[in-house]
Image (cartoon, rainbow, N blue to C red):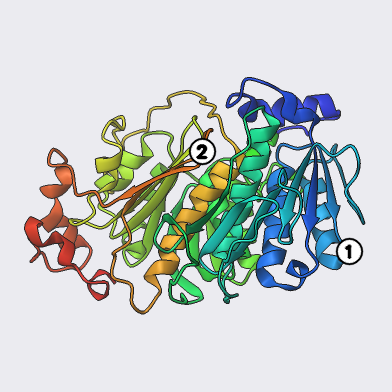
Amino acid sequence: MQAFPATAEEFYALRDDRTNRCVEGRGYQQSHVALVLDDAWSLTASGLVMLEVTAALLARWCRQVTIVGRPSANVDLAIASMRDADPFGVFHRSNRTPQDTSLVLRIGGVGEPTDVRIDAAGWTAAFGRGDEHPRVGVETTHTLGAVAAACFGVAEVFRRAVGFAPFDGTRIFDLFTLAFTDVPSRGPEPGRHLGDVLLIGAGAVGSAMAYVVARAGFKGRFLVIDFDRVKVENFNRSPVFAVSTHNELKADAVAACLQASGSEAESFPGDWEAFVKAGRIDDYRSFTWVPVANERGVRRSVQSNLPPRSVHASTSTNWGVNFGRHLLPSDGCLLCRFPTEPLTEAVLACSTGEVPSAGQKVDAALPFVSLFAGLTIVAELARESTTDHDDSTPNFLLFDFVPPGFGVHASTRPPLLSCSCLRDRAVWAAINGMSDTVNLKDAGSLTHEGRR
């Protein structure tokens, strides 16, 4: 068990270590951010989600945040969540923007050109100049766009805090098509239930996915697999991990987050190898697998067990997010995206070999990057629940938060011709209860109904 730091100096040395690996300067540590909540947005579901998520992300790196807005229970909850994330920070509410504010993040409304402004509706997220008011559509029963807007807004504030030039202009992002657009999203309304999900890894991306499910108005049935415990080092990149979950098993903390919002969730307090040895894989053949662990050769092991359908996302050390959807043979497999994964003895369900340990590895991370990675997974599950889903959305996304701009590249990637998944497709179809009648040239014709 990790003893909780007794002083602010000890706490920030641990909490900010991974953030410091992503930037050269430390000026962000002295930032005072004013989070301004427009009165009209305080009455909408999207506005309240933007408030909650933005506050949670800011508190992962900013030590002083003032919420500017009317007193309310939602503002009180946002402040409480920030204090849970950082017990040494200064977080409070005010009726007006403090004079010593260094950066302003505005939820709705219109302010100064130098402010960062966000708003959202449904699948759509808008961010940019504080004096511009783009059209984002009408409110829906889900708030995925609000989560994306919070990621974009906090990313822009952080970029300025570490010394990069402000992003110029305003942009609108459509989570249904995974593209920037000039008009509000026309994506259909998704179902509220995301189905059955095997979550392999409850670290930064896995816990972020659970947080998005809980905040964006969705439910599902989940099994969460992870062996690790929550440490202060994890606080900077996951809104689930805080003082209240310190030293808990990550699988338990993530399952509790899902349960609190109405999902069915169980935890498996072990690694993927232990899960394989327990002989439970065949019980989850009807689930969507979300492999977001990356240690101990787990990706290769997961793919060697021929998942029925998988959706993944990962983060990089240069402010990037990679998203992928995988259904053989049309989308290729997990190793088509990560072909250099190390070999491990325990790759098959019948294996009894030991997984070699590669030693402790610490990854650089930023909170808005991890949360956006989790969001891309939830958005894919939500797209699949729509009545007219036809897999027209690309199966690969690279989103880059790195300055000078927000870059996105989305495409549909076929299987690698060198990957063994092409040879395994008959076995995959038999194991997962699908007819192996689809040849490679017709791979894209698999229907949504045929994937259940």
Who is closer to the viewer here, 159 or 416?
159
The residue at 31%/35% (across/down) is 353
Left-right relation of 222 to 211 = left
Image quadrant holding the C terminus, namely bottom left
Alpha-carbon distance for marks 2 and 1? 33 Å
User: In which quarter of the view is residue 450 placed?
Assistant: bottom left
Residue 373 lies, with reference to residue 195, above or below; the image says above
- For disc 1, the neighbor class at 10 Å (few under 14, some 14 to 19, many from 20) is some
Residue 347 visible? The answer is: no
Who is closer to the viewer here, 150 or 60?
150
Q: Return the mark for residue 70.
A: 1
Toward the top, the furthest residue is 24
Quickly name the residue at label 2.
Answer: 405
Left-right relation of 230 to 285 = right
Who is closer to the viewer here, 415 or 398?
398
Q: What residue type is labelled 1?
A: Arg
Q: Position of residue 105 (x, y in %)?
A: 73, 48
Q: Position of residue 76 (x, y in %)?
A: 85, 60
The residue at 17%/47% (across/down) is 421
User: In which quarter of the view is residue 232 placed?
Assistant: top right
Which numbered disc, 2 or 1, marks the residue closer to the eye? 2
Helix, strand or loop at mark 2 = loop
Residue 164 lies, with reference to residue 81, above or below; the image says above
The residue at 33%/67% (across/down) is 286
Residue 244 visible? The answer is: yes
The residue at 57%/76% (across/down) is 140
Of pointers 2 and 1, the one earlier in the residue sequence: 1
Left-right relation of 27 to 251 = right
Q: Which amino acid does label 2 sit on?
A: Gly
Q: Position of residue 202 (x, y in %)?
A: 53, 48
